[in-house]
């Protein structure tokens, strides 16, 4: 234990990032975010305390040391938003949990630190018309191979028509075929749910399979990339960037916005809140309630604009 206390913070960080990649299987993007947050934390500590940072220093930090770091990030040259500051604090807590398991390093002062209060950001769904335009336009094979246009249509139809997360859609594989009237998914927290699949989505997937040049084995990804590997989330994001530019949509039109659109449009059409909760795989009803709030705001705007006693 005594020798372990002399281990540098950067050495411990290397072990932490390796753990995130190998054991927790987090994405390279997420691991890089953890590394940036902790690099900034260690750099601040070295300047703030005037000494090299090792595990012994981390074990003996006071609550004021942690608060000085958060204050510096809040008012620095590039001040962090409340959400980014909360993420930075979460990175520190995760790192301390790791060094606690690995080397028995504990610091009870960290539990005294409260993160910034975060207001829940409202989802920004596409309009019904924009969603329809999107699906029609992505089916146009101009500039891409017909099978890629069919793949894009199948993917976006599935996101909008079934409310899937992009990771859930891209995790589908050959053993999930044929896609019938319902699909069993395992989402966040290993929560299983049954999602109805609309005929339009079934047809789009079958059209893609008919054109796809790659053989479909049970372990094959359902959605192939252009070179035959699994299509990645970045490719889906790039697809939406292209479609945004083509249709003049806002930057909020992302793959996840199609899930927002699915929920909002269902509720606007009279869908039951608890049924939508089940379809989305939300653990709590409050997570689904935000979509009802968005739709209520929309209805109030329409009322205000159209009613004779409105605010026109």
Image: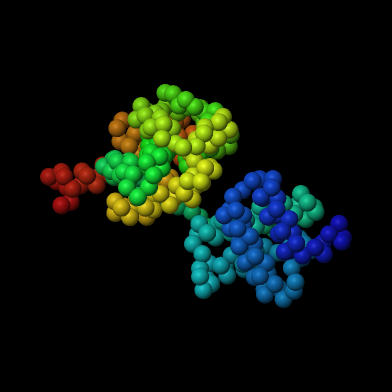
What kind of colouring is applied to the model shown? rainbow
Report the quarter where the N terminus lies.
bottom right
Decide if residue 266 is in sight here: yes
Instruction: Choose between 83 and 175: the one closer to the eye.
Output: 175
Instruction: Choose between 79 and 184: the one closer to the eye.
Output: 184
* Picture mark count: 0
Residue 158 screen position, x and y as percent: 41, 35
Instruction: Establish if 182 lies above or below 28.
Output: above
Q: Quadrant of residue 67?
A: bottom right
Residue 54 screen position, x and y as percent: 77, 65
Instruction: Choose between 215 and 7: the one closer to the eye.
Output: 215
Instruction: Choose between 271 and 188: the one closer to the eye.
Output: 188
Residue furthest right as drawn: 2
Decide if residue 186 is in sight here: no
Q: Is residue 227 left or right of residue 50?
A: left
Q: Quadrant of residue 55?
A: bottom right
Q: Is residue 71 left or right of residue 286?
A: right
Residue 81 screen position, x and y as percent: 49, 62
Instruction: Establish if 196 lies above or below 26.
Output: above
Residue furthest front as drawn: 213
Instruction: Establish if 270 lies above or below 108.
Output: above
Q: Is residue 10 left or right of residue 264?
A: right
Rendered residue at 74%/68% (across/down)? 53
Residue 23 screen position, x and y as percent: 69, 45
């Amino acid at each position: 234990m005594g020798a372990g206390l002399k281990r540098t913070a950067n050495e411990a960080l290397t072990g932490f990032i390796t753990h995130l990649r190998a054991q927790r299987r987090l994405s390279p993007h997420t691991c890089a975010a953890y590394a940036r947050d902790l690099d900034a934390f260690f750099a601040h500590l070295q300047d703030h305390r005037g000494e090299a940072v090792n595990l012994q220093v981390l074990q003996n930090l006071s609550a004021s040391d942690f608060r000085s770091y958060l204050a510096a990030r809040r008012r620095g040259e590039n001040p962090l938003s409340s959400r980014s500051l909360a993420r930075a604090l979460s990175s520190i807590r995760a790192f301390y949990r790791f060094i606690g398991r690995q080397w028995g390093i504990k610091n009870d002062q960290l539990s005294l630190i409260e993160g910034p209060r975060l207001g829940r950001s409202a989802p920004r769904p596409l309009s019904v018309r924009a969603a329809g335009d999107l699906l029609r336009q992505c089916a146009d094979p101009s500039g891409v191979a017909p099978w890629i246009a069919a793949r894009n249509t199948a993917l976006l139809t599935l996101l909008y028509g079934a409310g899937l997360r992009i990771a859930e859609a891209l995790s589908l594989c050959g053993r999930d075929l044929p896609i019938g009237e319902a699909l069993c998914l395992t989402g966040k927290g290993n929560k299983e749910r049954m999602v109805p699949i609309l005929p339009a989505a079934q047809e789009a997937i079958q059209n893609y399979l008919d054109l796809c040049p790659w053989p479909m084995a049970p372990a094959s990804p359902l959605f192939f990339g252009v070179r035959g590997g699994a299509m990645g989330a970045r490719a889906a994001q790039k697809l939406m960037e292209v479609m945004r530019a083509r249709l003049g949509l806002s930057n909020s039109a992302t793959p996840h916005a199609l899930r927002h659109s699915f929920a909002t449009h269902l509720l606007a059409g009279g869908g039951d809140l608890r049924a939508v909760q089940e379809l989305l795989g939300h653990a709590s009803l409050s997570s689904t309630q935000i979509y009802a709030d968005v739709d209520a705001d929309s209805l109030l705007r329409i009322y205000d604009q159209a009613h004779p006693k409105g605010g026109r």
